[in-house]
Amino acid sequence: MNIGLLLWLVPVLFTIHNLEEALTMRKYGTGHFRNMQRGQFAAAVILLTLLAVSFIYLGTNDEYGVMGRILAIFIQASLCINALVHMIASIRFRRYTPGVITAVLIYIPFSLYLFDAALKTSYVTGMQLAWAFVAGVVLQLPLVLGALFVGGWLVRVFRGGDRSSDRLENTFKSITASLYYVVH
C-alpha cells in the first residue's frame, strides 16, 4: 500500500465530487444556492481544493512529520464527513442532492480504505485519526462558509471591483441559508 499515492488521490476525487455538485447545483440544489453569485461556488471549491492539495503536500513530505500527516488525514476526514452530510440531506429531503452519488460511490469507500491503510502502515495512530475526525466535524462548516465568503469576494474583485451592497447581501444570504440548511 503506497499511502502517498492514496493521499494524492484525495484532491483528484475531490475534483470529481465538485464537478458533480457544480453540474447539478442549479437544477437540484436547495434555494440558497440560487442566491450565490455566478462563479462563487466554483471559486469556493477551487479554494478548498487548493487547501486539500496543500495539506496533502505536507502529509506526503517527511520533513513536516506528524503534523503534516494529521493535516493530510484531516482533509480526508473532513471530506468523509461532507459525504455523510450529502447522504443525510438526500435521506432528509427524500431526493437527489448535488454530490450524493460521488459521496456514496467514491468518498465513503475510499475514505474507509485510506483510513485503514493509514492505520495499517502506521501513517497515523488511531488517536490521531480520531482527532482528525473531531477537527473535521468542528471545522467543516467554518471551512465551507469561509470558502463561500472568500469565493464571493474573489468573484466581485475579478469582475471589476463590483462591491455593490446587493451582491454582498446575496453572499451573506447564501452563507446564512447554508448555515440554516446544515443546522435544521
Image: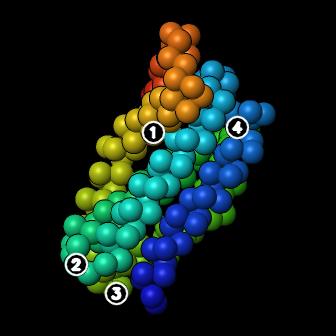
Amino acid marked by disc 3: Thr
| Disc 2 target residue | 63
| Disc 1 target residue | 147
Distance CA(mark 3)–CA(mark 1): 33 Å
- Mark 3 vs 1, N-terminal side: 3
Circles 3 and 4 in contact, beta carbons < 8 Å: no
Element class at badge 2 = helix
Amino acid marked by disc 2: Glu
For image coordinates 35% across by 85% down, the residue present is 120
Looking at the image, can residue 32 be seen?
A: yes
- Mark 3 vs 4, N-terminal side: 4
Distance CA(mark 1)–CA(mark 2): 28 Å
Residue at the farthest right position: 27
| Disc 3 target residue | 121
- Mark 1 vs 4, N-terminal side: 4
For image coordinates 58% across by 66% down, the residue present is 12
Element class at badge 3 = loop
Looking at the image, can residue 182 be seen?
A: no
Circles 3 and 1 in contact, beta carbons < 8 Å: no
| Disc 4 target residue | 25
